[in-house]
Image (tube, grey):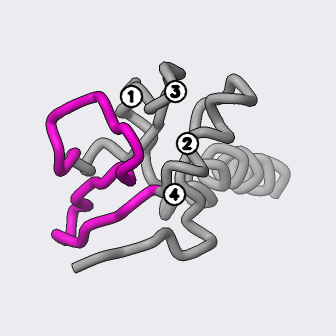
Amino acid sequence: MRNQSAFILLAALFAAPTLSRADEPRWESLRVFNLSGGQTVAVAVPSEWSPVEKSHNLGKSPLRFENASGEIVAIPVASLERASAEKRVFRPDFTQKVARSN
């Protein structure tokens, strides 16, 4: 009985962390972009996203990616400027809707 309980406990300890993050996106792609004021910002996006524009110089236009389902995801420049000023990596927040354009 103890061996069976110990096995179940060990299995739960190994499976729980994996299952709890199963639906989280993978942050495998880190890209650096230049903003209009000369600042740079690092943006972490899921690996299946691809940039719409190939240039790394944004100016005042939003940063746009195409996600795995073909939707265009636009990240406002103001969000990127805040991340740059705070010296942090920008990660899109999937709990809120990021501006999407078709």
Q: Residue at x 22, y 45 (%)?
A: 51
Give the residue pinned by disc 2: 80
Vertical relation: 61 (above or below) 82: below
Instruction: For the residues labelled 1 and 2, say whether their Cβ atoms are less than 8 Å apart.
Output: yes
> In the rendered structure, which segment of residues is drawn in magenta?
51-75
Mark carried by residue 37: 3
Graded by Cα atoms within 10 Å as few (under 14), some (14 to 19) or many (20 or more), the crowding at tag 3 reads few
Mark 3 and mark 4 lie on one chain; the one further toward the N terminus is: 4
Q: Residue at x 53, y 22 (%)?
A: 39
Q: Please state the horizontal and vertical placement of residue 33, each as a whole percent of the image.
A: 39, 28
Mark 4 and mark 1 lie on one chain; the one further toward the N terminus is: 4
In the image, 17 versus 12, the foreground residue is 17
Graded by Cα atoms within 10 Å as few (under 14), some (14 to 19) or many (20 or more), the crowding at tag 1 reads some
Determine the CA span between mark 1 and mark 3.
12 Å
Mark 2 and mark 4 lie on one chain; the one further toward the N terminus is: 4
Give the residue pinned by disc 1: 33
Instruction: For the residues labelled 3 and 4, say whether their Cβ atoms are less than 8 Å apart.
Output: no
Give the residue pinned by disc 4: 24
Q: Please state the horizontal and vertical placement of residue 71, each as a whole percent of the image.
A: 23, 72
In the image, 8 versus 27, the foreground residue is 27
SS for tag 2? helix
Q: Dividing the picture into quarters, in which one does residue 84 lie?
A: top right
